[in-house]
Structure formats: C-alpha cells, structure tokens
Image (spheres, helix red, strand yellow):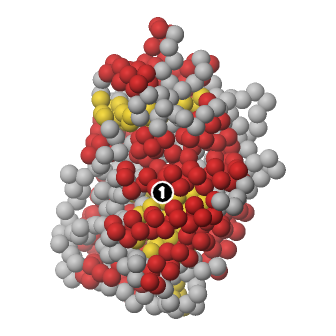
Amino acid sequence: MLNLKDLCSGLPLDPMPPNRGRDPSMPHAPVRTPILTPEEERLALRNSLRYFPPTHHNHLASEFAQELRQYGHIYMYRFCPPVHMRAYPIDQYPCRTPQAASIMLMIMNNLDPAVAQFPQELVTYGGNGQVFSNWAQFRLVMYYLSEMTEEQTLVMYSGHPAGLFPSLPSSPRAIITNGMVIPNYSSREQYEKMFALGVSMYGQMTAGSYCYIGPQGIVHGTMLTVLNAGRRYLGSDDLRGRVLVTSGLGGMSGAQAKAAVIAGCVGVIAEVDATPLRKRHEQGWLMEVTSDIEHCIRRIREAKRSKTPLSLGYHGNVVDLWERLLKEYEMTDELLVDLGSDQTSLHNPFSGGYYPVQLSFQQANQLMATDPAHFKTMVHESLCRQVAAINKLSEAGMFFWDYGNAFLLEAQRAGAAVQKEGGGATEFRYPSYVQHIMGDIFSLGFGPFRWVCTSGDSRDLALTDDIAATVLEEISANVTERVQQQYNDNIRWIREAGKHSMVVGSQARILYSDQKGRVCIALAINKAIADGRVSAPVVISRDHHDVSGTDSPFRETSNVYDGSAFCADMAVQNFVGDAFRGATWVLSTCDRKECCSLVVLK
C-alpha cells in the first residue's frame, strides 16, 4: 500500500505500476456508449497520452484504446493507486500550506469507497458525478497540491490540471470549472462524446468541487423538504403515520431513508441495485430491507397505523411499487401513501441513472451497452407507466413533487401525461420542490452550511455541533416568527444529528442557516480553534442549494416569476464573488457554483 508521501509524488513511470484492471469486489459504472469516429478515437488517445512522456506512448496507447472500446472511456486503471482512500487527518498530508492539505483531504473523501458510488471510475454519486476524468489527473493534482504555496492557485479545467499559477495569499488556492459547454453543443450525445475525448466532465454538484460529505450532505435538506411538504400539503408538521414513497438509495438519494425517520414519517424507498441498498442497511441508514412487495405493503400498513417512524428499503423497481400501491387503493379504497417523489438519476436516464421496469438490473446494464436505442425506448415506456400510476394516486389524494432530478422533464420527453394546462416551458402537472417547498426557505436567505473537522476526530465534530446549536439558539430569540421556525428546525436537527450515525467518510456536518447564522457559527468555530478546544482546522463550505447558487430551469430556478429561469448570471456572479471574497477554493460547473473555505487561525 502507498503512503501519502508516495501518493503525492506524481505519476509513477519508472517503473510503471502493474495494470490490475477493474477490481471485481467493487461496484462499477455502467459501460458508456459514445459514438466516436475512428479519428475521434485517435483524438481521445492523443488527449489521454498528453500526461505521459513520449517514451511511454507505445506501451500505453494499446491499453488505453482497449479501455475506450470496452468501457466507453479511458479511466487509466493502471494508475489507480493502491492506497486506503479516505479523509486522513490534515496533518498527515505532505504540503506547504494547510489550505492545499484541506483540498487533498476532501478529494480523498470523495473517492473513499464508503462514500463514492463507483470509486474506480472516480464517480462520487449520481451515476456520472466525476471527481476527475482519469487517474492520471488525480495523481497530478495531488502532486501539484503538495507543492503549492500560499502565492499560487491551481487551475482545474473539467478534471484537467492546467497547472499552478502565481497569485496572492488572499486568492483562492484552487479555481475549478466543469462541463462548461457552449449551449448549441450541449446535448446528451455530444456530452458523452466530449467526456470520451477527455475535454469535458460532469462534476455534478459536490463531486467535481471536492466538497461532498457523503449522503449526510443531503439528509438535512431532505428532512427540511419533507417537513415543509407536510406543512404545505398536509397542513401539519407532525408526520407520524404519514407515508413517503420514493426511489433511489445511491449517493445523494441515499439520504432519503434517514431523513424520513428523523422527520418522523414512514419512508419507503425503492432501489433496483442491491449494492447501495446493502450499503445503506449496513450503515444503519435503512432500518429494514425487503424484496417481497407484499411484505412491503404489510409493513407500510402496520407502521402507518402504529405511527411508528420507519425506513423501509424495497429491493425492486419503483414502478412496480407505484403500481402495487395503486392496485391496493383500487381493491381496498385505502390510500397507503401521503407524499411521493423520485430521486433516480434522471439527469442521466440512459446510462444507469434510471432502470426500466421491464428489465432486471442485469438485463438493463447489458442492453444499455449493446442496444442503446432499444434501451431508450424501454426507459420511455417505463416512465409512462410510472407517471400513470402516480397520476391516479395523486387524484386520490397523494401529494407528489419533482425532486430536482429531471423526473418530470424526462417523463414529458417520454410522452407521459405530466403537462400543465396553460403552463410555461418549465411548468408541469406537479411542482418542483424548490418552487413549492424550499423556495420559502430560500427567500429568507437560508441555505446549506457544511463543515468538516480535518482532525478526523469525532470529539471535534461533537463540539462543533454544540457550538452551532448554541449560536442558533441565541440568535433565534430575536427574529421574526417565520425565521424562527426555520431556526427551530435546524436546532432540532443539530441537537439530534449526532444520535443518528450519519457520518460516512469525513467527520462532517450540515445545517441550513441565513447569513447571520453562518457568520456567527464560523466565528465561534474559529474561536474554538484559537482556544484549542477544536484540535485542528475546519473546512467550511457552501453549495448550490440556496437562493442564488444555481441557474437550473427545472430545479432551483424553476418558474422564477421574472422570466429569468433560463439565464445563468446568478451562478456566474456567485463564482466570481466567492473568488475574491476569500474562499479557499471555488467551483463553477454547468449551471451552479460551490465554494469552500478553510478556517485557520492566523
């Protein structure tokens, strides 16, 4: 196994490591199917070989060509390092500035097998949320960060390290862009080609920004969404005995089970892939698992009647679950579901983000690689069946919302009945969760505030939890009733968070707050570092999920009333502003921004 010093020494070329290929014990990304001409294949090879001296090209060219033909992308498995990939304590990284070490820590956390969806393909979550495009990029970035001074900035271009550039100590240590494609050339097919060529990369939200803190990062937002859905649709924030049905237990969607229980309701989450379902159960995020749909119906009815919080993972296709719930309603006149949504990765519907009900998991993975056109047809048929069941249950009194995963957009493209009569281009039969549920929170200036204790010590995390809760309790005494409700939700969260075994990977936490809360918490944590009560620096980050971090017309900016849903100025302004206001590293990806700062006592 490599140590961190060797890991940060650059590309190992003399000798090169053995090519072990894919590790069969790990989950792997579905095979990609870019349609490349022979000349484009040669171009993809030339682009991948640019990281290596000409003396190694002959040896590596055939190997990379084989990867391209077999997997649809050049991952460079040979250079996947034999290291225990995790967030090590910050003082263990070889570096010249702790700011660089904090970035190293977060990168390795994103690729920790306990955190990442497909670690060897450098995918953190969402099926295609890349940290880097290949392992040569990872090796070079770790080397650059180990050499970086506080008068240099690392420039990252869709996974490609452009190099270290002179800058000021007050400048960001890293500037990152991912997937910045000219609109007329931004179709899904063109993206697949550009990713295969190694010139563009989809960094998702916190994968390519190195800010992911595991599914906990979305647990709190999901809990707030469920609580506020109850208030808006059911007229109550007491969700005991209420049932939420949804799907997805992978990266971000894996948060749904834990969030449902913390909100007090019965959460039933369908997942076709046994691997993430098993992972969530072993991590304690899922209380129960079943592949028997009749058992699933019985447990829903029992938990609903006893008003017992429950997270139940159904190993099967969510379409089968929706259709079975509809059948139960038609047979008994009993509506077993109160709230419904979906968190399959429908931004990536034809490459593993959505599995059609007509096929088993294995059959679907095979068909998407061997006959993509037929697979696409089956996805569309499945979406139409799913929407048909949801529509009938909604007519019976179930409340459904789009969870920002492009479910309604892809359903519309499939021909499903999701149109809204007289609606605009971004309006559907069901609302976006931002538009109807989280929008009120965003309008008050609340958004996610995350921190990572770089010591890796759980005692530091417990102390920062207490600091944050105390700060919010002090502030909440002098705010309006609407703002106080949001503070109370967050105080409830942070006081309970440590009891729910939510740490996966780094010692991290999240809560939602407005600007006053964020500033006061950061200052209080910084004082605790100065006093020695917190033993090491703390990484603090903001993400896209707030009032102005994203320009995404079918999610955060859905149905903006001034007509600017398709404009991208807000996210760009966030990126530029964060870069000169002191952030340690800043990312802009497609239509959103992320920023992180390292709290270090000067």
Vertical comparison of 591 with 89: above or below: above
Instruction: Decide if residue 34 is in sight here.
Output: no
Q: Residue at x 70, y 41 (%)?
A: 426
Task: From the viewer's perspective, tell me whether residue 280 is left or right of residue 163.
Answer: left
Q: Residue at x 53, y 55 (%)?
A: 491
Nearer to the camera, 313 or 34: 313
Task: Report the quarter where the N terminus lies.
Answer: bottom left
Q: Residue at x 65, y 67 (%)?
A: 516
Q: Position of residue 33 (x, y in %)?
A: 41, 47
Nearer to the camera, 42 or 334: 334
Q: Residue 12 is drawn in which quadrant?
A: bottom left
Q: Secondary structure at mark 1?
A: helix
Q: Position of residue 502 (x, y in %)?
A: 37, 54
In the picture of the structure, the residue carrying the numbered disc 1 is 494
What is the number of callouts on the image? Answer: 1
Residue type, label 1: Ile
Q: Position of residue 35 (x, y in %)?
A: 46, 49
